């Protein structure tokens, strides 16, 4: 599912029938990661359909983040295979997997403006300036922060910085979005705001999303929970009617976010 096509920035509002009929967006087959004789992840297997929103849920040290890092390419599996759209990717470096990444600590460049943070990957790919500006502008619109392009990360709240990190993950038309504890450093209201953005991107743009979390309340916003414990995938639960994060936000008192001038 592409958010952008050619020189124009287009938002795909709903998945197509072709998207649903295609192979799973992600397949993990007998994945294992060994750190020592006493520290083993897996073997575990699961598939994520195109347009699905899935959470990897479990306590710290259970293997969920290691699994995510193997998918992203930051860890090398000891055994098993990982396929994106039917293509094996475990031998590819992270920058050739076309996966959007969102981290708990935002991972923004403090010396770059918000515009340049979002544009960073596009500049590495030598995207033309006109298309680059349009794609960055569209990504900032999608996360509701189009007016902050000239600011710096230090001038934004934690929630705003995480929204910028989400925008940065979108501009390269990723095949899948991976988010590692994206609400771990945020308060309850801001966490719901972030999950509202994820739900909107999933439901309206058809993006395939995987979120790692140790919080059941956050995992509930996904349509499916994969429960991890002691390096194993223990349960795979479908959630027929996940709570609507946007609806929950409307029931909370409004809070105006501060932007620091310095």
Image (cartoon, grey):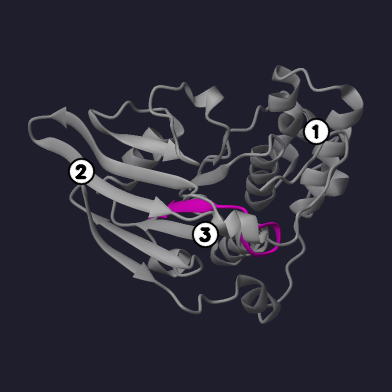
245 above or below 143?
A: below
Q: CA distance from mark 3 to mark 2?
A: 23 Å
- In this view of the protein, which residue sits in the foreground, 225 or 253? 225
Residue 68 lies in what quarter of the image? top left
* Tag 1 secondary structure: helix
Q: CA distance from mark 3 to mark 1?
A: 29 Å
- Residue 187 is marked as none
Residue beneath label 3, please?
52
Residue beneath label 1, please?
115
- Residue 42 is marked as 2
21 above or below 32?
A: below
Asked if residue 194 shows in the view, the reply is: no
Structural crowding at the residue carrying mark 1, measured as other residues with C-alpha within 10 Å and reported as few (<14), some (14–19) or many (≥20): many
Asked if residue 80 shows in the view, the reply is: yes
Q: Position of residue 167 (x, y in %)?
A: 70, 43
Q: Quadrant of the C terminus?
A: top right
In the figure, is residue 81 to the left or right of 24?
A: left
Earlier residue among tags 3 and 2 = 2
In the figure, is residue 155 to the left or right of 233?
A: right
Q: Which residues are magenta?
A: 202-213
> Marks 3 and 2: which is nearer the front?
3
Q: CA distance from mark 2 to mark 1?
A: 40 Å
Q: Position of residue 161 (x, y in %)?
A: 66, 44
Earlier residue among tags 2 and 1 = 2
């Amino acid at each position: 599912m592409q958010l952008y096509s050619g020189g124009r920035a287009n938002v795909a509002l709903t998945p197509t029938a072709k998207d649903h009929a295609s192979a799973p967006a992600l397949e993990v087959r007998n994945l294992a990661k060994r750190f020592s004789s006493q520290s083993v992840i897996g073997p575990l297997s699961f598939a994520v359909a195109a347009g699905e929103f899935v959470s990897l849920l479990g306590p710290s040290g259970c293997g969920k983040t290691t699994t995510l890092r193997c998918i992203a390419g930051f860890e090398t599996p000891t055994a098993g295979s990982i396929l994106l759209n039917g293509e094996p990717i475990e031998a590819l470096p992270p920058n050739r997997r076309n996966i959007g990444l969102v981290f708990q600590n935002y991972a923004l460049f403090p010396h770059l403006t918000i515009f340049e943070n979002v544009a960073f990957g596009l500049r590495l790919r030598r995207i033309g300036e006109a298309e680059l500006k349009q794609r960055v502008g569209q990504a900032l619109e999608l996360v509701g922060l189009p007016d902050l392009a000239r600011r710096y990360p230090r001038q934004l709240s934690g929630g705003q910085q995480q929204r910028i990190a989400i925008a940065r993950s979108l501009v390269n038309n990723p095949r899948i979005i991976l988010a590692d504890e994206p609400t771990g450093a945020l308060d309850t209201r801001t966490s719901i705001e972030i999950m509202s953005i994820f739900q909107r991107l999933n439901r309206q743009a058809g993006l395939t999303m995987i979120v790692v979390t140790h919080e059941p309340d956050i995992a509930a916003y996904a349509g499916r929970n994969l429960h991890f414990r002691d390096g194993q995938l223990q349960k795979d639960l479908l959630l027929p009617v996940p709570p609507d994060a946007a609806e929950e936000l409307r029931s909370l008192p409004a809070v105006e976010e501060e932007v620091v001038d310095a």
